[in-house]
Image (cartoon, rainbow, N blue to C red):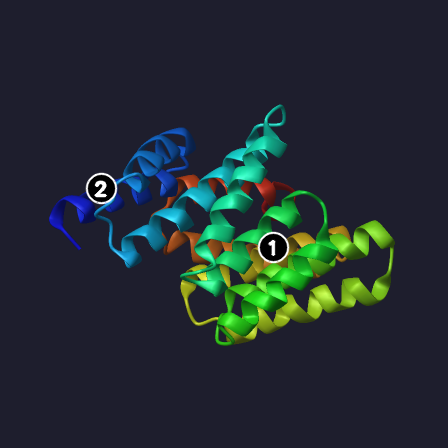
Amino acid sequence: MSKNHKKSLKKVSKFLNNRRFQKTILYGEKLLENKTLLKKERQEILSVLGWAYDQWAVFDKKARLKKQKKALRYFKKLAQYDTYTAWRGIATVYHHQNNPKKAIVCYKKAHKGNPKSKLLYNDLGNAYRRLGRITKNKRYLQLAMNYYQKALKEEKSRFGKLIAHTNLALFLREMGDLDDAKVYAKKVVALLKKMKDKSLSDRLKNALHDLIK
């Protein structure tokens, strides 16, 4: 990887991490046109562009479908390099399109690409939770709970545990179990104190505001 490419990739990834989706796409698509990119570099850019379009679509109701189609296009191109990230990305787009059945199928395909991934437990929990809400089927809601608990048990990273605790707090609040929801919410706050991401901290505290006041 050349120094210039490495610097450009770092810049594009930073834009995505800071949720500056328009700049991520502007610089990422320009970089993708470079014919001298190595396979690994092209793989990374396709992944970044897929996630950028998916996340931007969440906040853009008017152009949501158009951006989701672009996200799917980049994730499908990514599949030739990285099946795990590609299928996880495709699944996430379907989840955001309120199609949890398709999302679940694709998350399970992603699992075949990387059976050791702990992120998928939270992803599958979210998809089954949405499917349970849509169908009002308690079996799917129980599967959601099972996946969230598995994520909490298997995750070793602080960020992974943070997401698992957050999902459990939100899920239990939806189920009307406010006492247990508050227990998980307090653990979220404790974990956030050990992290230095103010933006993430503000978003999660806002989502759990009624459980931590």
Q: Is residue 61 above or below residue 48?
A: above
**What residue sits right under mark 1 in the picture?**
91
Task: Give percent across and percent down for residue 143.
Answer: 74, 68
Residue drawn at (65%, 49%) of the image: 95
Q: Give neighbour class at mark 1: few <14, some 14-19, many 20+ (Cα, 10 Å).
A: many
Residue drawn at (71%, 64%) of the image: 144
**What residue sits right under mark 2 in the picture?**
8
Left or right: 36 with respect to 3?
A: right
Badge 2 amino acid: Ser
For the residues labelled 1 and 2, say whether their Cβ atoms are less than 8 Å apart. Answer: no
The answer to whether residue 179 is seen in the rendering is no
- Residue that extends furthest to the left in the rendered view of this protein: 3
Task: Give percent across and percent down for residue 50.
Answer: 47, 45
Badge 1 amino acid: Ala
- Residue that extends furthest to the front in the rendered view of this protein: 35
Q: Is residue 13 above or below residue 40?
A: above
Q: Helix, strand, or loop for circle 2?
A: helix
